[in-house]
Amino acid sequence: MPDDALGDDLVIDEAFIRKVKQDEDGRVVLYFDELSDDEKEKLRDEHVIDVIDNHCNADKVTGIHLSGCVGITDATLSHIATNCIQLKELSVAVCDQITDDGIQAIVEKIGNKLTRLDYSDCNRCSNAALQAVVHHCPNLEELRADNTGMTQIPENIGD
């Protein structure tokens, strides 16, 4: 197995990077959600962290799309929050291991830059995640948080 293989037969090589990374006018968008179903099933935190740390300039990452990547946890969101300080779009829909802690890590550090956030079908997210979004994301244009563990909508949503 090559040195850049990170387990589960998912290899982070130039072909993999070409699939997920798009440079657009000096900014970088990572589309992990465009991988094959098999690759999305095998994708783990260490793979995403490796791409961010070793295959792109994290300061230029403005979008990360991880929808359907079920092996992703709050560890990835914490890493993104710390390293991708220009992030404007994040999609982690159907990443069922994401919890309130992961969403809070993102919005507390970079929520003022976010314009789009989707954590639909993240069943471990509750009212606390939405309250953090409402409190920390004044520039949010699009929020998708359907089919989560929320039981009530904050009164100050939309303010």
Image: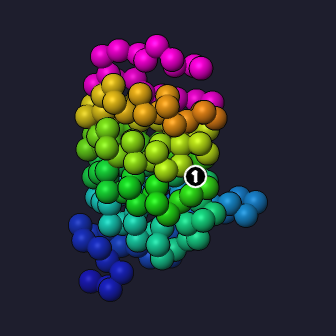
Q: Position of residue 86 (x, y in %)?
A: 61, 55
Q: Which residue is drawn at 41% across and 28% down?
A: 130
The residue to which callout 1 is attached is 87
Q: Give the range drawn in magenta.
A: 141-159
Q: Residues within 10 Å of mark 1 (few under 14, many from 20)?
A: many
Q: Position of residue 149 (x, y in %)?
A: 28, 25
Which part of the image, by quadrant, shows the C terminus? top right
Q: In which quarter of the image is residue 48?
A: bottom left
Q: Which colour scheme is used?
A: rainbow
Q: Position of residue 128 (x, y in %)?
A: 34, 30
The chief SS type of the magenta part is loop
Tell me if I can see residue 68 in this picture. Answer: no
Q: Where is residue 118 in the image (x, y as percent from the top left)?
A: 47, 35
Q: Check if residue 158 falls in the magenta segment.
A: yes
Above or below 31: residue 57: below
Left-right relation of 49 to 58: left
Tell me if I can see residue 2 in this picture. Answer: yes
Which part of the image, by quadrant, shows the N terminus? bottom left
Left-right relation of 6 to 65: left
Mark 1 is on which residue type? Leu
Q: Residue at x 43, y 17 (%)?
A: 154
Q: Check if residue 122 falls in the magenta segment.
A: no
Nearest the eye: 143 or 82: 82
Report helix, strand or loop for mark 1: loop
Q: Residue at x 26, y 44 (%)?
A: 97
Above or below 2: residue 133: above
Q: Residue at x 57, y 19 (%)?
A: 158
Nearest the eye: 47 or 18: 47
Q: Which residue lies furthest to the right in this view?
A: 25
Nearest the eye: 152 or 52: 152
Left-right relation of 44 to 92: left
Q: In which quarter of the image is residue 24?
A: bottom right
